[in-house]
Structure formats: C-alpha cells, structure tokens
Image (tube, helix red, strand yellow):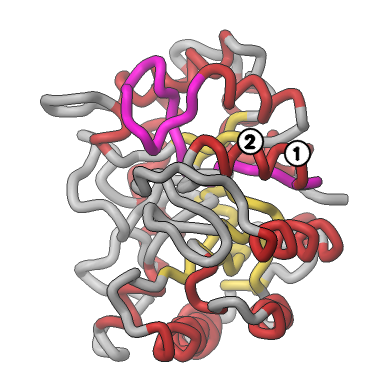
Amino acid sequence: MKVIDLHCDVLLKLYEAEGKIAFKDGATLDASYEKLVKGGVHVQAFAIFIKPEMKAEEKFQAALDQIHYFYTDVLGNHPNMKLIQSWQEIDDLKENEIGALLTLEGADAIGNDLKKLTILHQLGVRSIGLTWNNANLAADGAGEKRGAGLTAFGREIVQFNNQHKILTDVSHLCEQAFWDVIEEADYPIASHSNARAICDHPRNLSDEQAKAMFARGGLIHVVYCPPFVKAEGEVAIVDLIKHIEHFCSLGGAKQIGVGSDFDGISSKIIGLEDAAKQPNLLNALLQRYSAEEVKGFAFQNFLNHRPK
C-alpha cells in the first residue's frame, strides 16, 4: 500500500552536513531514498526549516541552500524521484517513482518580503506553515506565550497561498493564529499534528480545532513524534493509532493522513523508527480498519482533498 508522508526534515540534515551525507543511503537519515523505497512511500514532502536563532539576514540564503540539496541530491541523483509542482502530477507517477514535494516550515526565511515567497513558490514550494514554535512577522507559534493571531503580513501569505493553490499548514500555530487561518485559508492542512484529547501537548489540536479542520475540508496528518503521541514512557504504534481513532470519532475518517516528521525527531515510536517501517503502521491499522479505510489514511484521503 502506498504512503503519502507530508513532513520530513531530510533537507535540514543534508544542509547541516554540507553535502557529506548522501540522500541515497545516509546512515543518519530516517527518510533516505533506500528507506522510502523499502517503506512504499509514494510521495514525500521535504520541509525547508530555518532555525529561529539564525541571523535574519542569513535565513533566506539558508532556505535556498536547502533547496539546492533538494535539486542536486534528492532529485539530481535519483531519477525515480519526481518533482511535484502541480497537485495533479501525483497521478502521473509510475509504479517505481516517488513524488517529491517542497514545503516551508515557518515563514522566517522571507522576513516581511512577499517577493521572496514568490521565488520559493517558483522553485516548487507547495505547502507553507507560517511559523515554527516561535513568533515571527507572520504569526505566533505554539511556543509563543503571547498567543497572538495572524499579522497583516501573515494574512497576505495566506491570500498568496489561496491564489496559487498552496496548502496553508496550521501544525505549529498558536490557537488564535489557527482560528485566523481557518477564516482565511482555502486549503488548510495540519501536516504533522495529533489529538490534544489523547496527549495534552501545545503542538496537538483540540477537538474544536479538529472539527473545524474537517468542516473546512482540511486534513490532519498524524505525527510520529513520541512526546506528541503519549505524555511519558515508551511509545508503541498502538499509541499512535489512538489518535487516529479519536480523529475518526470526530468525523474525520476521510480526512486523516500521516506526517512522520522523520529526521526532525530525536526519539522514535517502537516499530516506526524510519521510513522503511511505514508498513508496520499500515499492518497494525488493518487489524482495526477495513482495507479501504487504511488506504484512505495512507494516501487516498490526501488525493481526495488536495487543491483542484
């Protein structure tokens, strides 16, 4: 069964290693090419992430550098990795091909300059989260105590996303910013978030937020980060499935997907340590859900709700 995974941080690792890690089989990569193939990944989203402590004047160049590794290594060294620039191109992938999608995790890289966002879009970015956990010129993130909503500039970004059929990712937003996005965004998505009712973490979504996402036709892709799955102790696949079950109980069975956060997490779910282990989750889900429902979680729900 194919998998569409909406979040990994491979590009950050390639960038920080300055080309000394190979995407093909890098031992430190959770989502290397070989592991994606082994795990049956059909489309992998590659996030551009800029650490908040970086000097403001260096951030856009850091984003471009990560895109450089995306084009020269992820795509350039692997003919079967295919750039996804329009959502319909996913349908054109052949059996042995993997779609590669660029995303932006936090708008820090563009400062307050929408022209830079235009450049990133032209280079292939098709999903944008306004913040990481910090505050920036677009919005407050989940870790910002102030908890303010979107700025005027943040609203401009969402409008840009709407115009260009770009997903607006709510996963790292504070609650007020989330509700502002729900008002503004035509294509809301949570690329890697779980249910706060199951694990009370500020990075997870409340039932009210989840219901609002489902009502707007948005998707929630569950994340494999153990602290977002279970408050303490070892985390097993069954613990992650509790979040899927909960979202299903809220009416979201046809709007759930996966966003692993591989290469961006320091601890792992037992049995789900890297992209090669994706079938372990699917097999566990097949013990509880029909093949059609699991197909939905794995990839079909995303295909049904992508921008048209």
Look at the image and tell me in which quarter the N terminus lies: top right
Q: Position of residue 255 (x, y in %)?
A: 66, 29
Residue that carries the numbered disc 2 in the rendered image = 179
**Residue type marked 2:** Trp
CB of mark 1 within 8 Å of CB of mark 2?
A: yes
Does residue 26 appear left or right of residue 299 in this picture? Answer: left
Does residue 279 appear left or right of residue 78 in this picture? Answer: left
Residue at image point 81% right, 59% down: 165
Residue at image point 69% right, 25% down: 214
Residue that carries the numbered disc 1 in the rendered image = 183
Does any portion of residue 78 appear in the rendered image? no
**Residue type marked 1:** Glu
Quadrant for residue 248, please give it: top right
In the displayed structure, would residue 21 be above or below residue 260?
below
Whether residue 223 is in magenta: the answer is no
Q: Position of residue 60 (x, y in %)?
A: 49, 85
Residue at image point 48% right, 14% down: 245
